[in-house]
Amino acid sequence: MADAPVAARRVQRLGSIFGRFGLASLSSAIVSVSHLLVQIFSIHHLGTSAIGTLAFLLVIIQFGYSLSNALVATPYTIAVNQHEEHDPAAHAFFYPVNLLLCMAQGLVCGAIAWVMATPMAALVFGVTGMLQLVRWFGRSNAYAHHAPARAARSDIAYAATILVGLLVAMRTGATLPSIGGILLLASLAGLLPFGVAYLRDHFALAPVEALRRYRPVWRDQSAWTLVGVLSTEATSNAHSYGVTLLAGPAAFAPIAVGMLFFRPVNVCITALTQLERPRMTRAVARGDHEAAIRSERVFMGALVMLWLATCVLAAVVLYGFPELILKPTLDHGTVATAVLLCALLSLIQCIQTPMSVMTQARRAFRPLAAQSLRSCGVGIVAVAALTLATTPVFSVAGVVLSQLVMMLGIWRLDRQWREARG
């Protein structure tokens, strides 16, 4: 009978974890499934080169999310959660800065689509890339103000629009620009829950004035965070850039299929980071280090559970229903190798991310950037060597090595901080 209270506490603890992450995880999972359907649809309706091009553009958009987190979302979240009282006017400059970032993202996506595809694809993906980041900061804004339901509504509207668009495309046929058009409409639908006021805030200040007020944030936080994001991107997606540039989008297609399975994990990592960063920041700011460490552990546990579920799903689909993701032009063995390597990479990222978020909450941006730069050098060399010396799929092993170096470096920073506080 003595075990009954213990079991009850465990069930209660598990329930609180699901309650805490449930809404953010569910809405993020819905978005992940919608992106999964887009890529599965592209596998069956586009040529091999177009499949690789679409996958590469989605990597670029995901990179935009990371840039948004580094330059506007993380500093904004920290700023509004440092004190109990929040003055909206004091942080209004973040919105115009976000708009400039969104426009830059649109230009990059448009240029890539122009080079790899057609002018029409460039136009569509240029606008899509811009709107994706406008929506992304809206989600970050909602989480920063502890309003996850608003972000969830955006995710649901976004995913529902993609589903409707794919159902229409099944009847009318699809091209790369038309798939980009579906993502564009979904981005617009996802902006509706944030309201007109959110969009209007992006024009509250002139860009020059906004950048002037942003300068202290850049000097103290964003510059170091940006170094970390750029080096992390060069590390974690070195295979995407290396294979696409050295071997072409067709050679990237099998790797893209392998990455496809773990895209839901990547999206949930990013979304749950937005949820947990304000919690950790507030706990560290008030000196409650035990609460911050507890948040870090729960965050890591949730991600590992999600990773395990994804691995089971990947194995079932790959060996039970391979026709869902494979076509005659894609080799089953190569795709299976890509899935295995991507699984290892995803596991390392699930363990590393909570420690990284904790390091950011402690405002230790410079040592975090140093760790990222160190692993970046390892990743670029390893991926380039493997891409040129072996088949392109093994380039992912170079990323696994570099991320392992990064994880161990952040773990050391995390342990040093804990030991300093007993």
Image: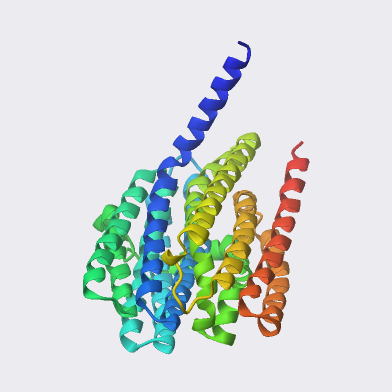
Q: Is residue 96 visible?
A: no
Residue 217, image x and y in percent?
Answer: 54, 61
**Residue 47 left/right relative to 169:** right
Residue 293, image x and y in percent?
Answer: 64, 39
**Residue 114 left/right relative to 309:** left
Foreground: 22 or 233?
Answer: 22
Q: Write down the quadrant of residue 37 in the picture.
A: bottom left
**Residue 101 left/right relative to 380:** left
Foreground: 326 or 350?
Answer: 326
Residue 239, image x and y in percent?
Answer: 60, 74
Q: Is residue 236 visible?
A: yes
Q: Quadrant of the N terminus?
A: top right
Residue 10, image x and y in percent?
Answer: 57, 26
Q: Is residue 241 above or below residue 76?
A: below
Q: Write down the quadrant of residue 389 in the picture.
A: bottom right
* Residue name at image x 37 percent, y 73 percent: 44
* Residue name at image x 54 percent, y 56 percent: 315
